[in-house]
Image (spheres, helix red, strand yellow):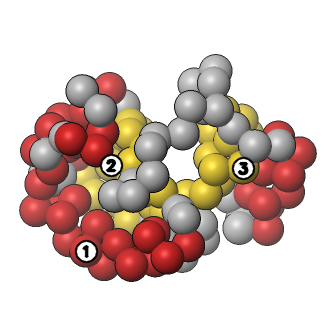
């Protein structure tokens, strides 16, 4: 099911069951490039407390920024926590790594290979 037709409940299930999700209210999900998180937008939620209401609040808090700046919502699960952030899609790996370092990130995400690249 395309992300843009998923309900919040379906998005939450996909995040928890599939380990993560990247979505935007206005853009198609990236199919290539590298995702770089934007510093200062991160939220962590225990997986047992994560659900549609939590995701809805996060999306509401950042919707205008995502839309105005062409960003994406990112979500993934690690060690019992759901991480929410804003991210940008960068096509060039070297540029993505440089942007990741500028944003004080520990890693970027390779969309094509589905791999985390440590910085």
Q: Secondary structure at mark 2?
A: strand
Labels 2 and 3: the sequence-earlier one = 2
Would residue 1 be seen by someone viewing this image from the given angle?
Answer: yes
| Left or right for 64, reference 102 | left
Rendered residue at 71%/65% (across/down)? 104
Q: Compare marks 2 and 1 and give the one earlier in the sequence.
A: 1
Disc 3: CA contacts within 10 A as few (<14), some (14-19) or many (>=20):
some
Residue position for label 1: 60
Q: Quadrant of residue 108?
A: top right
Which residue sits at x=64%, y=32%? 32
> For the residues marked 1 and 3, what is the alpha-carbon distance in whole angstroms?
24 Å
Q: Specify which label sits upstream in the sequence, 1 or 3.
A: 1
Element type at mark 1: helix
Above or below residue 34? Residue 70 is below
Quadrant of res 91: top right
Instruction: Give residue 111's position: percent from left, percent from top.
Output: 60, 32
Binning the other alpha carbons within 10 Å of mark 1 as few (below 14), some (14 to 19) or many (20 upward) gives: few
Of tags 2 and 1, the one toward the viewer is 1
Mark 3 lies on residue: 90
Mark pair 2, 3: CA separation? 23 Å
Q: Image quadrant for the N terminus?
A: top left
Q: CA distance from mark 2 to mark 1?
A: 17 Å
Identify the residue at image location x=74%, y=57%: 100
Residue 98 is situated, as x and y percent measured from the top left of the image, at 85, 57
58 or 63, nearer to the observer: 63
Looking at the image, do the residues carrying marks 2 and 1 touch, with CB atoms under 8 Å apart?
no
Q: Which residue is mark 2?
A: 82
Find residue 52 and name its label.
none
Residue 119 in view, yes or no: no
Judge the density around disc 2: few (<14), some (14-19), many (≥20) Cα neighbours within 10 Å: many
């Amino acid at each position: 099911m395309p992300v843009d037709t998923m309900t919040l409940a379906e998005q939450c299930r996909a995040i928890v069951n599939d380990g993560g999700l990247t979505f935007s209210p206005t853009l198609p999900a990236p199919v290539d490039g590298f995702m770089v998180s934007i510093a200062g937008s991160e939220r962590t939620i225990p997986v047992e407390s994560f659900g549609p209401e939590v995701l809805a609040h996060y999306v509401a808090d950042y919707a205008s920024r995502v839309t105005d700046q062409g960003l994406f919502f990112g979500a993934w699960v690690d060690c019992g926590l759901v991480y929410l952030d804003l991210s940008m899609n960068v096509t060039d790996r070297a540029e993505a790594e440089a942007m990741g370092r500028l944003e004080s990130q520990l890693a970027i995400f390779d969309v094509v290979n589905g791999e985390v690249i440590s910085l």
